[in-house]
């Protein structure tokens, strides 16, 4: 459930980064038509992600009920009320549910491409994002507000990098091939323009992810030895190794694949390397879901 919630969060943030940052930076051929094509497809992804976030949020309530009251206790009005309305966890859960429902409500209205609709989505996604650290390890830290803020920025970094990469691959790149029905050379020129717009954006968000991740990891580990002497440390090391694969593949895309666009195998090479990068990114989310539920070395 945590992995699904993390995936929804990262992809929703990625949708915002793609639309509000990458597509605004795009200066390649057919800029207006490509933006319109992306804006017409992106709301469908946001709608599905919002619905999935609602379902996962309800599933998390069931899991939390089992964790607190035991798997043999059936949910009742009294137990659910105690969990949702008389516990700090419940207040966070209500914010998550309200923001996820808002995403599903506003998604169909995004096709009108109004500022109000996208502003509402930004607020709902950021609210949904902050509920992830608010109900995890950071909330129990010695300085909870600082820890929650650090983890919030960490997740935003993941969304701006990995989330926007996913939607660039599955939304923007296919749209670049459809615009005006231009041939392969025209599509490659648009894809190259998308990558040039994405690369500096990814670098900024990846830097946020790395800096906040290192600071959080150092505070949670309490020492370098915990990296191999504790379950938390070994899980974190696995996450770092997977992130290195993601970063290495991204650097390969930038240095080797981008210059090859326009050649016979350029687009195919981009698809292959992007899928490797995204597959490693999915594994990062799964490992992170395990990590946030793993006791830290000091616990």
Image (tube, rainbow, N blue to C red):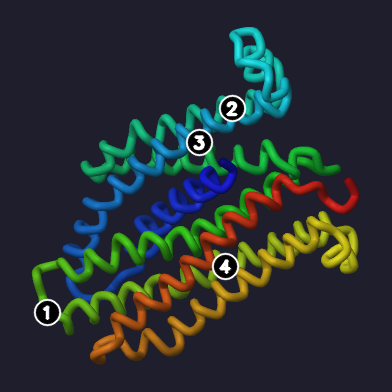
Residue bearing the label numbered 2: 61
Circles 3 and 2: CB distance less than 8 Å? no
Q: Gap between marks 2 and 1, in whole Å?
A: 50 Å
| Crowding near the residue tagged with mark 1, few <14, some 14–19, many ≥20 C-alpha atoms within 10 Å | few
The residue indicated by pointer 1 is 183
Q: Which badge, 4 or 2, is on the more N-terminal residue?
A: 2
> Residue 92, percent across and down?
62, 29
Which quadrant of the view contains residue 87? Answer: top right
Q: For the residues labelled 2 and 1, say whether their Cβ atoms are less than 8 Å apart.
A: no
Q: CA distance from mark 1 to mark 3?
A: 42 Å
Q: Nearer the viewer, mark 3 or mark 4?
A: 3
At 30% across and 86% down in the image, what residue appears? 266
Quadrant, the C terminus: top right
Point out the tag, 1 or 3, that comes first from the N-terminus.
3
Q: Residues within 10 Å of mark 3 (few under 14, many from 20)?
A: many
The residue sitting at 49% across, 60% down in the picture is: 160
C-beta proximity under 8 Å, tags 3 and 4: no
Compute the Cα span from label 4 to label 1: 33 Å
* Separation (CA) of disc 3 from disc 4: 27 Å
Residue of label 3? 56
Tell me the residue that label 4 is attached to: 206
Tell me if residue 29 comes above or below residue 258 in the rendering.
Answer: above
**Where does residue 91 sit, x and y in percent of width and height?**
63, 24
Residue sticking out furthest to the left:
181
Q: Quadrant of the N terminus?
A: top right
Secondary structure of residue under mark 1? loop
- The vertical placement of 73 against 9, above or below, is above
Q: Which residue: 52% across, 45% down?
A: 4
Dot label at residue 29: none
Report x, y in % for residue 72: 68, 20
């Amino acid at each position: 459930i945590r992995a699904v919630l993390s995936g929804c969060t990262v992809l929703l943030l990625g949708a915002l980064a793609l639309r509000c940052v990458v597509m605004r930076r795009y200066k390649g051929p057919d800029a207006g038509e490509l933006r319109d094509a992306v804006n017409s497809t992106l709301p469908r992804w946001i709608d599905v992600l919002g619905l999935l976030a609602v379902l996962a949020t309800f599933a998390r309530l069931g899991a939390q009920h089992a964790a607190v009251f035991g798997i043999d206790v059936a949910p009742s009005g009294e137990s659910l009320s105690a969990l949702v309305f008389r516990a700090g966890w419940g207040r966070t859960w209500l914010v998550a549910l309200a923001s996820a429902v808002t995403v599903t409500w506003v998604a169909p209205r995004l096709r009108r491409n109004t500022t109000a609709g996208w502003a509402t989505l930004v607020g709902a996604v950021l609210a949904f994002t902050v509920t992830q650290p608010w109900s995890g390890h950071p909330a129990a830290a010695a300085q909870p507000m600082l820890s929650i803020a650090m983890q919030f920025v960490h997740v935003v970094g993941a969304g701006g990098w990995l989330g926007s990469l996913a939607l660039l691959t599955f939304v923007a790149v296919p749209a670049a091939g459809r615009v005006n029905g231009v041939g392969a050379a025209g599509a490659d020129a648009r894809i190259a323009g998308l990558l040039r717009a994405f690369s500096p954006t990814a670098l900024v968000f990846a830097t946020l992810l790395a800096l906040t991740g290192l600071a959080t990891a150092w505070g949670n580990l309490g020492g370098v030895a915990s990296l191999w002497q504790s379950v938390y440390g070994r899980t974190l090391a696995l996450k770092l190794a997977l992130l290195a694969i993601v970063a290495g593949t991204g650097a390969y895309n930038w240095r080797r694949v981008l210059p090859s666009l326009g050649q016979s195998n350029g687009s195919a090479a981009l698809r292959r390397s992007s899928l490797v990068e995204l597959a490693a990114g999915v594994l990062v989310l799964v490992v992170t879901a395990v990590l946030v539920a793993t006791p830290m070395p000091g616990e």
